[in-house]
Amino acid sequence: MAKAHDLGQKFYWQKLYYHTENPPLFDTETTQEIEPPFRHGKCIVLRVPASKVAIVIGHWKDERREVDALLTAIGGTVTQENGITDEMMEDY
């Protein structure tokens, strides 16, 4: 993961490498920090033509609790089937 450079509420990454054969020139995405302050944001990805390198520019929207940030980062959810209740999550 590239290191985000903060510009107030805005951020950018100098480069991002695509791992697909034919990446788009322009894309929108969300991002989630997995270290404090666990900010969540939206970004625009601009790929340099004829390469797999991109520049990412975005905006931090909000901060999340650690458990919520990590679940977002892995695309996970808390369900009743795994025996974890909302009351258990309040401690985190």
Image: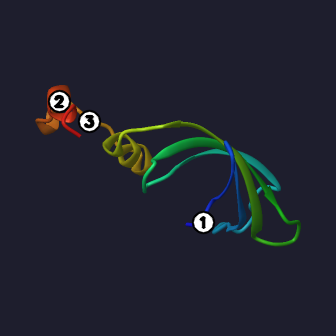
Foreground label between 3 and 1 = 1
Cα separation, mark 3 vs mark 1, equals 29 Å
Residue beneath label 2, please? 80
Which residue sits at x=45%, y=47%? 38
Q: Which mark is residue 78?
A: 3
Q: Position of residue 18 (x, y in %)?
A: 67, 66
Height in image: 35 above or below 90?
Answer: below
Where is residue 9 shown, x and y percent of the image?
A: 67, 42
Q: What type is the residue that disc 2 sits on?
A: Gln
Neighbor class of circle 2 (other Cα within 10 Å; few <14, some 14-19, many 20+) is few
The amino acid type of the residue labelled 3 equals Val
Q: Where is residue 78 in the image (x, y as percent from the top left)?
A: 26, 36
Circle nearer the N terminus (3, 1): 1
Q: Which of marks 1 and 2 is nearer the N terminus?
A: 1
In this view, the residue farthest toward the right is 49
Residue type beneath disc 1: Lys
**Circle number at residue 3:** 1
Picture coordinates of residue 36 (x, y %)? Answer: 43, 52
In contact (CB < 8 Å): disc 1 and disc 2 = no
> Which circle, 1 or 2, is nearer the viewer?
1
- Helix, strand or loop at mark 3: loop
Judging depth in this view, the residue of 63 and 31 nearest the camera is 63
Proximity of marks 3 and 1: CB atoms separated by less than 8 Å: no
